[in-house]
Each structure stands twice: as C-alpha cells, then as structure tokens.
Image (cartoon, helix red, strand yellow):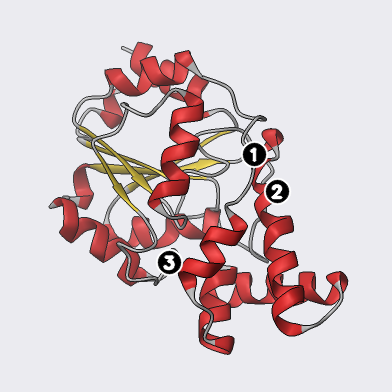
Amino acid sequence: MLARLAPIRNWIFDLDNTLYPASARLFDKIDERMGLFVAGLLGVDRAEAHRIQKSYFHAHGTTLAGLMVEHDVDPHEFLNFVHDIEMDVLAHNAPLAAAIARLPGRRIVFTNGDAPYAARVLARLGLAEAFDGMHDVHAMGLVPKPHPAAYQGLLESFAIDPRTSLFAEDMARNLKPAKDLGMTTLWVDNGSEQGPDAARDHIDFVTSDITRWLHDILEDA
C-alpha cells in the first residue's frame, strides 16, 4: 500500500462515472430521461427543459433536489422514470473487482442515485459482492451531495472516522465537504460534468482511471 494511504480503513466510492468510465456514456441516458421528465412536467420544449434541468443541478446538487423544492415532485416517480434505462454499455470489470477486494477495511458506495439502480450498475460491473454497504439518496433523506448533511449522515450510519477514510468521486465539488470533514479525497477526472468554477485545492489525488489508480497504490511499497 502507498505509505500515505496506509491509515485508510474506509474506502468510499461514488457510483456514476466513478466506478465505470464516463466514456461508457451510461449517465447520458439518465440525463436524457431527466430532460424528458422536466419537459413533460413543465410543458416546455427539450431545449428549455435542458436549461432548467442544469440550473437545478448546479443550484441544488441534483436535478431531483431542484424539482422537489420548486415543483414538489415525488422522488420515487422521478427516480423510477430516469433510471428506466438499458445498461448494455457496461461490462464486467474483473481488475477493478480484484483491486477493491484487496483494500484493507470497509468499502462503501455513496451515491445520489437510489439503491435499486445502484445495485443494477454494480451487478453489471461484476461488483455486486464488492462492497460492505451503500448510502443512497434515500438514506440521505433526499438531501444529496454536496450538501454537508449527506456526508454527516454517512459518517453516522457507518460509524466512520473521516480521518481514516478516502472518498473517490468524479464531481470535484462533491469532494470538498468530504475534505472539510477530514477525509482523503480522490478526484476521478474523466471528463464528466462539473460545476462552474469548481475549486481543486481540496483534492489530494487525481486519476482518470480508478482501476489503474487502485492497482498502482496497492503495488506501491
């Protein structure tokens, strides 16, 4: 294990565009479904729906959070609609499964998606048995990353000491609350969507390939 990471005993991973590459474009399918939902809800065209969707994403953390605040949308209805997608763009990642299995301590998924969707993604990647727990948007009380309450709830639910924890995430802005709590942070910089003017000074490690990074740190003396 890389010496700097030897104290880590809680390995926390985002799901979308983190445990699979953004180049798979799975989240593009969800993004399209979100636009369809907004267009149907508000009776606007697709261009305006896209503008509203992204404004809610940047202002509230997720499109869903914005829709709940602004339009009292039922989160179950929204999540069922946007996650109704095929996952044929994902494939088993045996090297990633092997690397995660070698990590000392607990492995946890921390996602703004819901557990049924996350379970489908993990199964498709061959990671169904790789994790010890999951903290999804319902466990967050529907208050998503990057809201600090989401992270505090994660710590409480799993009795996590942030000083012995690493959080890996593709959204740079979602790493700041983790760093503020004392976690080590890993930014998976793979070209997925970022907030405007996202800071970078709270990032400890950067990779474009989570599988390669894990193998590298496990092989380092």
* x and y percentages locating residue 139 in the rendered image: 30, 62
Looking at the picture, tell me which residue is in the foreground, 32 or 200.
32
Q: Nearer the viewer, mark 3 or mark 1?
A: 1
* x and y percentages locating residue 190 in the rendered image: 64, 38
Q: Which mark is residue 144?
A: 3
Kindly identify the residue that appears in the image at 57 percent across and 52 percent down: 83
Amino acid type for the residue under numbered disc 2 = Lys
Looking at the rendered structure, the secondary structure element under dot 1 is: loop
* x and y percentages locating residue 141 in the rendered image: 32, 71
**Mark-to-mark CA distance, 3 and 1:** 24 Å
Position of residue 163 relative to residue 22, above or below, is below
**Mark-to-mark CA distance, 3 and 2:** 20 Å
Kindly identify the residue that appears in the image at 29 percent across and 30 percent down: 4
Of marks 1 and 2, which one's residue comes earlier in the chain?
Answer: 2
Q: Which mark is residue 21?
A: none
Position of residue 95 relative to residue 60, above or below, is above
| Horizontal side, residue 157 vs residue 151: left or right | left
Query: Which image quadrant: the C terminus?
Result: top left
Whether residues under marks 3 and 2 lie with C-beta atoms below 8 angstroms apart, the answer is no
| Horizontal side, residue 3 vs residue 119: left or right | left
Of marks 3 and 2, which one's residue comes earlier in the chain?
Answer: 2
Looking at the rendered structure, the secondary structure element under dot 3 is: loop
Q: Which mark is residue 86?
A: 1
What residue would you read off at disc 2? Answer: 29
